[in-house]
Amino acid sequence: MAAKMGLVAEPVSTQVIPRDRHAMFFATLGVIASSVERLAVEIRHLQRTEVLEAEEYFSPGQKGSSAMPHKRNPVLTENLTGLARMVRAYALPAMENVALWHERDISHSSVERMIGPDATITLDFALARLTGVIEKLLVYPDNMMANLNKFRGLVHSQRVLLALTQAGVSREDAYRLVQRNAMKVWEEGKDFLEELLADKEVRDALSEAEIREKFNLDYHTKHVDTIFRRVFG
């Protein structure tokens, strides 16, 4: 069984196995928990009322906020954030267990009897819960597009900036030109694309077709299938 699991004899041991091995294990659990929370926090943000680009599955008759009936709270992902904090918390006592008196005392024992089952069971539950959230996640592409359009093209400023520098405009001047037109969108509600097309300095460097191409969202998703194949085979 040990061979099948890849276990080997401890090369350096006293009365106890050095606890840096255990500390690394619990630290790894903490990193995994942090990755769980990274996804949970993103979903929580996307579920905000004013964003609503994705949300946890909300079953018929399910209650949301106790004070605001219109809200559909991300209760599962909020729970995952809390669980991740607990798993990370278990890593600290595991690291404090490393320094034992003459590498022989058993002060680590009481700690490990608690954090061993708690950390592993908590993370196992969190991973199972996250799997369920992802499987039933509701996604709203129309809301995503509507949110992007609220900025009237500003999300494309980086590509325009790079295009100007590639056309020979200095980085400083390119930034000035892009920012000048972007501020009109922020302050006056103008359309970013139309402002760029009407800017003589910008047009001296880029044609209308080149500017419009920088507003194509497909550029940002062109490698999605490649990434999915790389991750999931």
Image: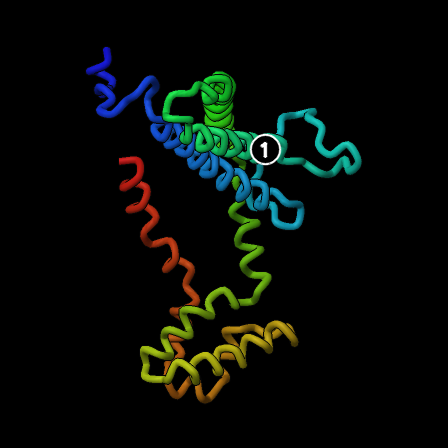
Residue at image location 70% in from the left, 24% down from the top: 61
For image coordinates 42% across by 59% down, the residue present is 217
| x then y, percent, for residue 138 | 54, 36
**Residue 41 makes an appearance in the image:** yes
Q: What residue type is labelled 1?
A: Gly
Q: In this view, does 38 lie to the left or right of 56?
A: left
Q: Residue 206 location in percent, x, y?
A: 37, 81
Relative to 193, residue 79 above or below:
above
Task: Locate residue 146 relative to residue 220 in the image: left or right.
Answer: right
Q: Which of 152 and 113 is in front in this view?
A: 113
In the image, is residue 193 above or below residue 27? below
Q: Judge by depth and name the residue closer to the eye, 200 or 100.
A: 100
Residue at the location (60% across, 42% down)? Answer: 47
At x 28%, y 22%, the residue is 13
Q: In the displayed image of the protein, which residue is found farthest to the left?
A: 3
Q: In which quarter of the image is residue 22?
A: top left
Q: Look at the numbered disc 1 and give the secondary structure of its residue.
A: helix
Q: In which quarter of the image is residue 213?
A: bottom left
Position in image of residue 218 (x %, y %): 38, 57
The residue sitting at the front extreme is 102
**Mark 1: few/some/many CA within 10 Å (<14, 14-19, 20+):** few
Task: Pick the residue in front: 116 or 10.
Answer: 10
Please identify the residue farthest to the right as the structure is shown.
67
Residue 169 relative to residue 179: left or right: left
Give left or right: position of 193 versus 18. Answer: right
Residue 170 figure quarter: bottom left
Q: From the top left corner, tell me how far across and down residue 204 is, in percent.
A: 39, 88
Identify residue for label 1: 82
